[in-house]
Amino acid sequence: MTELERKQDRAPIPSGWEYATAPESRDIVQLRERYGLFVGGDWLEPKETYTTIDPSSEEPLAEVGQATEEEVGLAVAAAREAFENGWSALPGSERAKYLFRIARILQERSREFAVLESLNGGKPIRESRDVDLPLSAAHFFYYAGWADKLEYAFPNRTPKSLGVAGQIIPWNFPLLMLAWKIAPALAAGNTVVLKPAETTPLSALLFCDVIRQAELPPGVVNIITGDGRAGAALVKAEVDKVAFTGSTEVGKAIQRELAGTGKKLTLELGGKAANVIFDDAALDQAVEGIINGIYFNQGHVCCAGSRLLVQESIYEPVISKLKRRLQTLRVGDPLDKNTDVGAINSRAQLDRIQELVRSGEEEGAEIYQPPCRLPEKGYWFVPTVFTNVAQSYRIAQEEIFGPVLSVLTFRTPDEAVEKANNTPYGLSAGVWTEKGSRILWMAQKLRAGVIWANTYNRFDPASPFGGYKESGFGREGGLHGLEPYLKFE
Ligand code: NAP
Ligand code: MG
């Protein structure tokens, strides 16, 4: 370490410097009191409803439908009718036209969507504005480009659409996961029924407005809201393909349910990614990468770098830089533009994080949390680092899905690979080193679908994303993401 770096590390953190609040106005979002189910291009009055809330204040936002099995059936029938009576026969260039329209409207209305996403999900406006929205639009643009080029994408294979896709998405990136699901499905000529997560239905419901604005034919996209029961009904309904993103537990149940039915399935499940820091890495950049890897979106990220593997020789400086950086994270109002870490998505998720953190302390890990004032109402968790973690501890094995990092060490590259792969998951990994050859060597050895080198949590619609082992199968994004929505004759 240079003399200058040492001095910087000892300098006190300027705790007296408070940022003024910089709240984004929520006026741009016009919420209805009550939302129906979006079926066949119209709002269907639901038999049952529930209240969706703002997790940062626990304030109710709106009443939304809890779709029954019968209502799910109506949505699937509307999608079938739209598929058979027009959509599947449209030339690809026509389908592309609608996808381009949707992308443009999302860009035009991005502030409205970003505010709504932060209101209903608890994520910082900085992230919904700069990550969720631009990437959602980019996915529609990207797949719009493929819609009329399928035969070039899969030469000599005669790609054909499947029919109706049933799509189930989680609450961590509500609109982005909707884009990942709907854009390739429509580009490939299918129609869809999508169920957003119980806690974050509002951006999908606002998206129904976009669909109408784009004049997409009725029934091509149907949105049904509700909890896991609505998801289970969608899996059982007359769909040709199921695309699921969520927990490994539910993914396994869906796989059991679909076995032998001939319905196609892709599963994007959990992860417990290793973020591996070698002693020749640029440490300050690596620390930023560690922070981004685990505290981005409150750690509600399936590819989060939740296991930090540090080479033993640089353990001390990395941990001290990391703790110092942690003290500068601003936790609070998701709509404040200065906020780094927002609210935990739900009471249930907060309970799960607290339970796993307790287990870490009981098993003998050492906990570090920076001084932090949390709002009184709502669901919050202080960004946390665990050191002294053994590979057998639950916090090193299970997906916490919260702002909690478990630190382990290694001595040799072989040991790093062995520890990184020692997990039932295999979604993503990070490697920090100056040596290009080592990056390539690690990329070959790590059993993970996505490997970032000297960066973390980078996404591009052209780049396929998906897992090994209990992280699921099938890829989303890129050409790979089109294939599960096609059959070949
Ligand atoms: P989850 O239950 O698997 O939720 C994913 C989606 O599946 C939601 O829309 C959910 O509805 C729905 N669902 C629930 N039960 C279903 C069933 N039997 N059949 C069909 N669909 C069903 O996940 P969660 O409860 O929200 O979170 C639990 C854990 O899953 C997290 O702690 C995290 O470890 C992991 N997770 C991973 C990802 C990821 O991106 N890989 C995303 C979210 C969560 P409800 O919203 O009503 O549950
Ligand atoms: Mg659930």
Image (cartoon, helix red, strand yellow):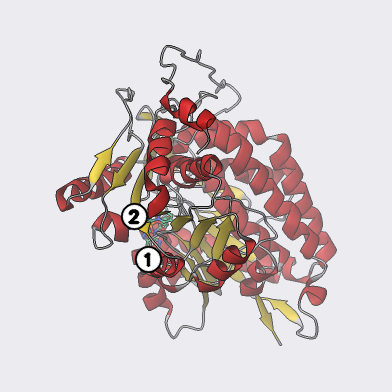
The mark nearer the N terminus, 1 or 2, is 2
Q: Is residue 94 above or below residue 20?
A: below
Q: Which residue is mark 1?
A: 419
| Distance of label 1 from label 2 (alpha carbons) | 9 Å
Q: Secondary structure at mark 2?
A: strand
Q: Quadrant of residue 395?
A: bottom left
- Amino acid type of disc 1? Lys
- Residue plotted at (59% across, 43% down): 132
Q: Quadrant of residue 460?
A: bottom right
- Residue plotted at (43% across, 70% down): 414
Q: Would residue 308 be visible to someone looking at this image?
A: no
On the image, the x and y values in percent for residue 111 come to 64, 31
Q: How busy is the neighbourhood of tag 1: few (under 14 within 10 Å), some, or many (20 plus)? A: some
Q: Could you say which disc has been placed on residue 167 in the image?
A: none
Q: Would residue 272 be visible to someone looking at this image?
A: yes
Q: Secondary structure at mark 1?
A: helix
Specify whether 381 is left or right of 449: left
Q: Could you say which disc has been placed on residue 408 in the image?
A: 2
Mark 2 sits near ligand 1, with its Cβ under 8 Å away: no
- Amino acid type of disc 2? Leu
Q: Between residues 481 and 64, which one lies in front from this camera angle?
A: 481
Question: Cβ–Cβ below 8 Å for labels 1 and 2?
Answer: yes
Mark 1 sits near ligand 1, with its Cβ under 8 Å away: no
Q: Is residue 284 above or below residue 234?
A: above
Q: Quadrant of residue 309?
A: bottom left
Q: Between residues 456 and 453, which one lies in front from this camera angle?
A: 453
- Residue plotted at (73% across, 70% down): 88
